Image: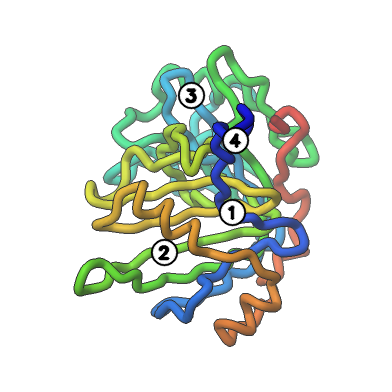
Amino acid sequence: MCSSDLVEAPPERTGVSRAMPLVLPSTQLAADEIVIAPAGEGVGDVLLTAPDGTTLWLAEFDGAESPLDDLDVQQVGSIGVAAVEAPTAVSYRFQVPCGVVIMNDAPGQPAFRPAVTALLEATSIDASAAIDISLPDGWSVLDLGESADAFITQFQLPLFAETTPVRLTQIPGGSLSQLTFGGRQLTPTTFLGAPAFVDSAPPTPETVSVYWRDADTVFSITAQELTLDDIERFVVSLEPGTVDSWTSRFAAAVPNPAPADPTCEPQPSFGSTLDP
Protein backbone atom coordinates (compact mmCIF):
# COMPACT_ATOMS: atom_id res chain seq x y z
CA MET A 1 0.00 0.00 0.00
CA CYS A 2 1.46 3.38 -0.99
CA SER A 3 1.30 6.35 1.36
CA SER A 4 -1.27 8.11 -0.85
CA ASP A 5 -3.73 5.29 -0.16
CA LEU A 6 -3.79 6.40 3.47
CA VAL A 7 -4.85 9.95 2.63
CA GLU A 8 -8.60 10.40 2.85
CA ALA A 9 -10.13 12.17 -0.13
CA PRO A 10 -11.60 15.59 0.71
CA PRO A 11 -15.37 15.47 1.13
CA GLU A 12 -17.57 16.94 -1.58
CA ARG A 13 -20.35 19.34 -0.72
CA THR A 14 -22.54 19.80 -3.77
CA GLY A 15 -20.46 19.37 -6.92
CA VAL A 16 -22.16 22.34 -8.59
CA SER A 17 -20.59 24.32 -11.44
CA ARG A 18 -21.55 27.30 -13.59
CA ALA A 19 -23.19 24.87 -16.03
CA MET A 20 -25.03 22.98 -13.26
CA PRO A 21 -25.49 25.55 -10.49
CA LEU A 22 -28.35 24.02 -8.49
CA VAL A 23 -28.83 20.85 -6.45
CA LEU A 24 -31.79 18.49 -6.24
CA PRO A 25 -32.54 15.37 -4.20
CA SER A 26 -31.74 12.15 -6.04
CA THR A 27 -35.12 10.77 -4.97
CA GLN A 28 -38.64 12.22 -5.00
CA LEU A 29 -38.29 13.75 -1.56
CA ALA A 30 -41.51 15.43 -0.46
CA ALA A 31 -41.45 19.23 -0.85
CA ASP A 32 -44.08 21.48 0.72
CA GLU A 33 -42.67 24.82 -0.40
CA ILE A 34 -41.27 25.74 -3.82
CA VAL A 35 -40.41 29.38 -4.52
CA ILE A 36 -38.37 31.22 -7.11
CA ALA A 37 -37.71 34.73 -5.81
CA PRO A 38 -36.76 36.88 -8.81
CA ALA A 39 -33.76 39.16 -8.72
CA GLY A 40 -34.57 42.65 -7.54
CA GLU A 41 -33.66 45.21 -10.18
CA GLY A 42 -31.35 47.84 -8.75
CA VAL A 43 -30.77 46.00 -5.47
CA GLY A 44 -27.39 45.37 -3.89
CA ASP A 45 -26.27 44.42 -0.40
CA VAL A 46 -23.13 44.04 1.69
CA LEU A 47 -22.23 42.13 4.84
CA LEU A 48 -19.78 43.98 7.06
CA THR A 49 -17.86 42.51 9.99
CA ALA A 50 -17.33 44.88 12.90
CA PRO A 51 -14.23 44.87 15.13
CA ASP A 52 -16.12 42.90 17.81
CA GLY A 53 -17.02 40.17 15.29
CA THR A 54 -20.68 41.15 14.87
CA THR A 55 -22.16 41.22 11.37
CA LEU A 56 -23.98 44.22 9.88
CA TRP A 57 -26.12 44.16 6.73
CA LEU A 58 -26.09 47.17 4.40
CA ALA A 59 -28.38 47.36 1.36
CA GLU A 60 -29.39 49.78 -1.37
CA PHE A 61 -32.64 49.67 -3.32
CA ASP A 62 -33.49 51.69 -6.42
CA GLY A 63 -36.81 53.48 -6.26
CA ALA A 64 -38.70 56.73 -6.06
CA GLU A 65 -37.77 59.64 -3.84
CA SER A 66 -37.98 58.51 -0.21
CA PRO A 67 -37.40 61.43 2.15
CA LEU A 68 -36.71 60.88 5.84
CA ASP A 69 -38.96 63.74 6.97
CA ASP A 70 -40.64 61.66 9.68
CA LEU A 71 -37.33 60.51 11.18
CA ASP A 72 -34.70 62.17 13.37
CA VAL A 73 -31.90 62.65 10.85
CA GLN A 74 -28.47 63.33 12.31
CA GLN A 75 -25.38 64.57 10.49
CA VAL A 76 -22.63 62.00 10.98
CA GLY A 77 -19.48 62.92 9.12
CA SER A 78 -20.59 63.92 5.62
CA ILE A 79 -23.89 61.99 5.51
CA GLY A 80 -27.36 62.29 7.03
CA VAL A 81 -28.45 59.20 9.00
CA ALA A 82 -31.54 58.29 11.01
CA ALA A 83 -31.55 55.50 13.58
CA VAL A 84 -34.74 53.44 13.85
CA GLU A 85 -34.81 51.33 17.01
CA ALA A 86 -36.72 48.10 16.39
CA PRO A 87 -37.50 45.57 19.16
CA THR A 88 -34.40 43.46 18.44
CA ALA A 89 -31.92 45.62 16.52
CA VAL A 90 -31.22 49.17 15.34
CA SER A 91 -31.64 50.04 11.66
CA TYR A 92 -30.00 53.06 10.07
CA ARG A 93 -31.54 54.93 7.12
CA PHE A 94 -29.15 56.92 4.95
CA GLN A 95 -30.25 60.17 3.31
CA VAL A 96 -30.13 59.67 -0.48
CA PRO A 97 -31.94 61.44 -3.37
CA CYS A 98 -33.80 58.33 -4.58
CA GLY A 99 -34.47 54.81 -3.41
CA VAL A 100 -33.54 53.48 0.01
CA VAL A 101 -30.27 52.76 1.78
CA ILE A 102 -30.54 50.84 5.04
CA MET A 103 -28.06 49.27 7.46
CA ASN A 104 -29.10 46.80 10.17
CA ASP A 105 -26.90 46.43 13.23
CA ALA A 106 -26.48 43.27 15.26
CA PRO A 107 -29.19 42.47 17.84
CA GLY A 108 -28.93 44.09 21.24
CA GLN A 109 -26.63 46.95 20.23
CA PRO A 110 -27.38 50.58 21.17
CA ALA A 111 -27.95 53.24 18.53
CA PHE A 112 -24.81 54.97 17.28
CA ARG A 113 -22.48 52.71 19.22
CA PRO A 114 -18.85 53.87 18.83
CA ALA A 115 -17.85 51.33 16.19
CA VAL A 116 -20.89 52.11 14.04
CA THR A 117 -20.38 55.87 14.45
CA ALA A 118 -16.79 55.43 13.25
CA LEU A 119 -18.10 53.49 10.23
CA LEU A 120 -20.69 56.17 9.43
CA GLU A 121 -18.06 58.91 9.74
CA ALA A 122 -15.99 57.01 7.18
CA THR A 123 -18.92 56.79 4.74
CA SER A 124 -19.48 59.16 1.82
CA ILE A 125 -22.27 59.52 -0.75
CA ASP A 126 -21.26 61.50 -3.85
CA ALA A 127 -23.35 63.46 -6.34
CA SER A 128 -24.14 60.27 -8.31
CA ALA A 129 -25.38 58.61 -5.07
CA ALA A 130 -22.42 56.20 -5.01
CA ILE A 131 -21.81 54.94 -1.45
CA ASP A 132 -18.19 54.50 -0.42
CA ILE A 133 -16.67 53.56 2.91
CA SER A 134 -13.03 53.95 3.91
CA LEU A 135 -13.28 51.04 6.34
CA PRO A 136 -11.95 51.96 9.80
CA ASP A 137 -9.49 49.66 11.56
CA GLY A 138 -11.04 46.32 12.46
CA TRP A 139 -13.85 46.52 9.89
CA SER A 140 -14.00 44.24 6.85
CA VAL A 141 -16.32 43.28 4.00
CA LEU A 142 -17.55 39.71 4.40
CA ASP A 143 -19.40 39.58 1.06
CA LEU A 144 -21.39 41.75 -1.31
CA GLY A 145 -23.29 41.44 -4.55
CA GLU A 146 -26.23 42.44 -6.69
CA SER A 147 -29.54 40.64 -6.43
CA ALA A 148 -29.94 37.34 -8.33
CA ASP A 149 -32.72 34.75 -8.70
CA ALA A 150 -33.13 32.64 -5.54
CA PHE A 151 -34.39 29.05 -5.66
CA ILE A 152 -36.05 28.00 -2.40
CA THR A 153 -37.38 24.58 -1.45
CA GLN A 154 -38.60 23.19 1.84
CA PHE A 155 -38.35 19.43 2.07
CA GLN A 156 -39.82 17.04 4.60
CA LEU A 157 -36.80 15.01 5.64
CA PRO A 158 -37.44 11.65 7.32
CA LEU A 159 -36.56 11.71 11.01
CA PHE A 160 -37.18 8.42 12.79
CA ALA A 161 -40.91 7.68 12.41
CA GLU A 162 -41.77 11.28 11.44
CA THR A 163 -40.42 14.03 9.20
CA THR A 164 -38.84 17.43 9.86
CA PRO A 165 -38.78 20.48 7.57
CA VAL A 166 -35.47 21.43 5.96
CA ARG A 167 -35.39 24.71 4.03
CA LEU A 168 -32.81 24.95 1.25
CA THR A 169 -32.06 28.25 -0.51
CA GLN A 170 -29.62 28.44 -3.42
CA ILE A 171 -28.66 31.49 -5.46
CA PRO A 172 -26.49 31.04 -8.56
CA GLY A 173 -24.34 34.14 -9.00
CA GLY A 174 -25.54 35.37 -5.62
CA SER A 175 -23.88 36.54 -2.44
CA LEU A 176 -23.99 35.69 1.24
CA SER A 177 -25.36 39.19 1.79
CA GLN A 178 -28.44 38.42 -0.33
CA LEU A 179 -28.73 35.00 1.26
CA THR A 180 -28.91 36.61 4.70
CA PHE A 181 -31.36 39.33 3.64
CA GLY A 182 -31.96 41.67 6.56
CA GLY A 183 -28.90 40.41 8.41
CA ARG A 184 -27.66 37.39 10.34
CA GLN A 185 -24.88 36.91 12.84
CA LEU A 186 -22.47 34.74 10.89
CA THR A 187 -19.80 32.77 12.72
CA PRO A 188 -17.17 30.86 10.71
CA THR A 189 -17.30 27.07 10.86
CA THR A 190 -16.19 24.07 8.85
CA PHE A 191 -18.91 22.34 6.84
CA LEU A 192 -18.01 19.14 5.03
CA GLY A 193 -14.34 19.98 5.23
CA ALA A 194 -14.49 23.52 3.86
CA PRO A 195 -15.19 27.04 5.19
CA ALA A 196 -18.79 27.99 5.91
CA PHE A 197 -20.83 30.02 8.40
CA VAL A 198 -23.52 29.32 10.96
CA ASP A 199 -26.08 31.73 12.39
CA SER A 200 -24.93 32.27 15.97
CA ALA A 201 -28.08 34.19 16.95
CA PRO A 202 -31.02 32.36 15.31
CA PRO A 203 -34.59 33.57 15.92
CA THR A 204 -35.28 30.41 17.92
CA PRO A 205 -32.55 28.57 19.83
CA GLU A 206 -33.35 25.15 18.32
CA THR A 207 -32.80 26.40 14.76
CA VAL A 208 -29.60 25.48 12.92
CA SER A 209 -28.69 27.51 9.83
CA VAL A 210 -25.56 26.99 7.74
CA TYR A 211 -24.35 29.18 4.86
CA TRP A 212 -21.69 28.42 2.27
CA ARG A 213 -20.52 28.92 -1.29
CA ASP A 214 -19.68 26.25 -3.87
CA ALA A 215 -18.48 27.39 -7.29
CA ASP A 216 -20.62 30.45 -8.18
CA THR A 217 -23.65 29.45 -6.06
CA VAL A 218 -24.37 30.42 -2.46
CA PHE A 219 -26.44 28.07 -0.29
CA SER A 220 -28.21 28.08 3.03
CA ILE A 221 -29.97 25.32 4.89
CA THR A 222 -32.17 25.96 7.92
CA ALA A 223 -33.56 23.15 10.03
CA GLN A 224 -34.80 22.29 13.47
CA GLU A 225 -34.25 19.04 15.36
CA LEU A 226 -31.16 18.38 13.22
CA THR A 227 -27.46 18.74 13.98
CA LEU A 228 -24.84 20.09 11.62
CA ASP A 229 -23.78 16.49 11.00
CA ASP A 230 -27.36 15.62 10.00
CA ILE A 231 -27.39 18.55 7.56
CA GLU A 232 -24.06 17.43 6.10
CA ARG A 233 -25.50 13.99 5.37
CA PHE A 234 -28.47 15.60 3.64
CA VAL A 235 -26.21 17.76 1.45
CA VAL A 236 -24.13 14.74 0.44
CA SER A 237 -27.34 13.10 -0.86
CA LEU A 238 -28.06 15.98 -3.26
CA GLU A 239 -27.07 15.98 -6.92
CA PRO A 240 -26.13 18.96 -9.13
CA GLY A 241 -28.45 20.02 -11.91
CA THR A 242 -29.32 22.84 -14.28
CA VAL A 243 -31.89 25.58 -13.77
CA ASP A 244 -34.05 23.81 -16.36
CA SER A 245 -33.87 20.52 -14.46
CA TRP A 246 -34.84 22.30 -11.23
CA THR A 247 -37.81 24.12 -12.78
CA SER A 248 -38.92 20.94 -14.58
CA ARG A 249 -38.66 18.85 -11.42
CA PHE A 250 -40.77 21.26 -9.38
CA ALA A 251 -43.03 22.55 -12.19
CA ALA A 252 -41.91 26.13 -11.56
CA ALA A 253 -40.99 29.05 -13.81
CA VAL A 254 -38.53 31.87 -13.23
CA PRO A 255 -40.63 35.07 -12.88
CA ASN A 256 -39.65 38.40 -14.32
CA PRO A 257 -38.02 40.84 -11.88
CA ALA A 258 -40.09 43.70 -10.57
CA PRO A 259 -39.12 46.84 -12.50
CA ALA A 260 -37.48 49.68 -10.63
CA ASP A 261 -38.79 53.25 -10.85
CA PRO A 262 -36.79 54.84 -13.69
CA THR A 263 -38.01 58.39 -13.12
CA CYS A 264 -35.93 59.36 -10.08
CA GLU A 265 -32.22 60.13 -10.41
CA PRO A 266 -29.61 59.49 -9.20
CA GLN A 267 -30.21 55.98 -7.85
CA PRO A 268 -27.98 54.67 -5.03
CA SER A 269 -25.14 52.24 -5.74
CA PHE A 270 -22.06 50.89 -3.99
CA GLY A 271 -18.68 52.36 -4.88
CA SER A 272 -15.39 50.58 -5.48
CA THR A 273 -14.22 50.85 -1.86
CA LEU A 274 -16.67 48.13 -0.85
CA ASP A 275 -15.21 45.56 -3.26
CA PRO A 276 -13.43 42.98 -1.07
Q: Give percent across and percent down for residue 225.
A: 24, 57
Alpha carbons under labels 3 and 1: distance apart: 28 Å
Task: Looking at the image, tell me whether mark 4 or mark 3 is earlier in sequence order.
Answer: 4
For label 2, the crowd category at 10 Å Cα-Cα, with few meaning under 14, some 14 to 19 and many 20 or more, is many
Alpha carbons under labels 2 and 3: distance apart: 28 Å
Q: Residue 237 carries which label?
A: none
Above or below 180: residue 187 = above
Asked if residue 228 can be seen in this view, the reply is yes
Task: Looking at the image, tell me whether mark 1 or mark 2 is earlier in sequence order.
Answer: 1
Location of mark 4 (residue): 5
Alpha carbons under labels 4 and 3: distance apart: 44 Å
Marks 3 and 1 close (CB-CB < 8 Å): no
Location of mark 3 (residue): 50
Q: Is mark 3 on a helix, strand or loop?
A: loop
For label 1, the crowd category at 10 Å Cα-Cα, with few meaning under 14, some 14 to 19 and many 20 or more, is few
Marks 2 and 4 close (CB-CB < 8 Å): no
